[in-house]
Image (cartoon, rainbow, N blue to C red):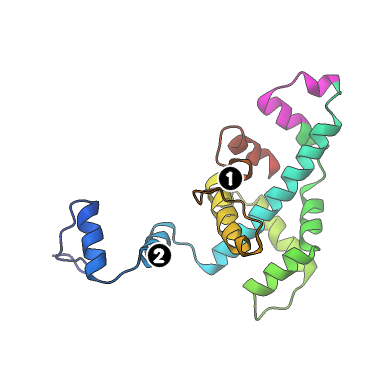
Amino acid sequence: MAKNKSSIKINNYDDLVKELKNWDVSPQETWDLVFNMKLGIDKRTIWKLQRYYHYAIKRLFVFTDISKQNDNNPKIKQLKGEQHFAEIKKLMPKRVDTIKELVSSDFYQLFFKFNNKKRKFDSRLEVKNLEKLLADKREDKYFTAQYMDLIAESESRWSQKKGKSMLNEEGNLKEEFSFDRPGFRTLLRYLR
């Protein structure tokens, strides 16, 4: 038998549920364990994902505003899909300007204090760090629709107590807030 392997054989989900009940493991505890083991997300990564998510949302609002302002522009009106996204991206403010706006918000500073209890907030350093992260190609694996939706759903559950949930009746993320759908996965690349 391999080291750290159980002698109990689990052949299907019924066996798994039975064993979890025998060990008094709650469904939430089970999910938390699987989530941490499979995704390997620590607090530092969650903080990074939260920054990416709020940056993407800010860029999405700017993208939407610019698209609406250019509805009558004949050059942009005829474009579809990625060509449209690329043309609108040319009109968007620079990445650093969006980052500065995000970092200067009270909302960002609140999240900073929550995630960095021992560090002093330095807006210049935060802008520099987030700008480096967003430009780094190694971060492509984190700047994805699945991670954006994961953060949106977790923050929605947190804010649900205030009555402003992004979840539907089944507890899933409402479609209009989801990046993980056709078109939006592509758009996310242009928002970065």
Which residue carries the number 1 mark? Answer: 174
Whether residue 128 sits left or right of residue 37 in the image: it is right
What segment carries the magenta color?
74-87
Q: Quadrant of the N terminus?
A: bottom left
Is residue 142 at least partly visible in the picture? no
Front position in the image: 137 or 56: 56
Q: Quadrant of residue 91?
A: top right
Residue 74, horizontal then vertical, whole percent = 84, 19
Query: What element does badge 2 sit on?
Result: helix
Q: Which residue does the image show at 72% across and 56% down from the upper left? A: 131
Residue 133, horizontal then vertical, whole percent = 65, 56
**Local crowd at mark 2 within 10 Å, few (<14), some, or many (≥20)?**
few
Q: Amino acid at mark 1?
A: Lys
Magenta stretch prevailing secondary structure? helix
**Local crowd at mark 1 within 10 Å, few (<14), some, or many (≥20)?**
some
Is residue 79 a member of the stretch shown in magenta? yes
Which residue carries the number 2 mark? Answer: 28
Query: What element does badge 1 sit on?
Result: loop
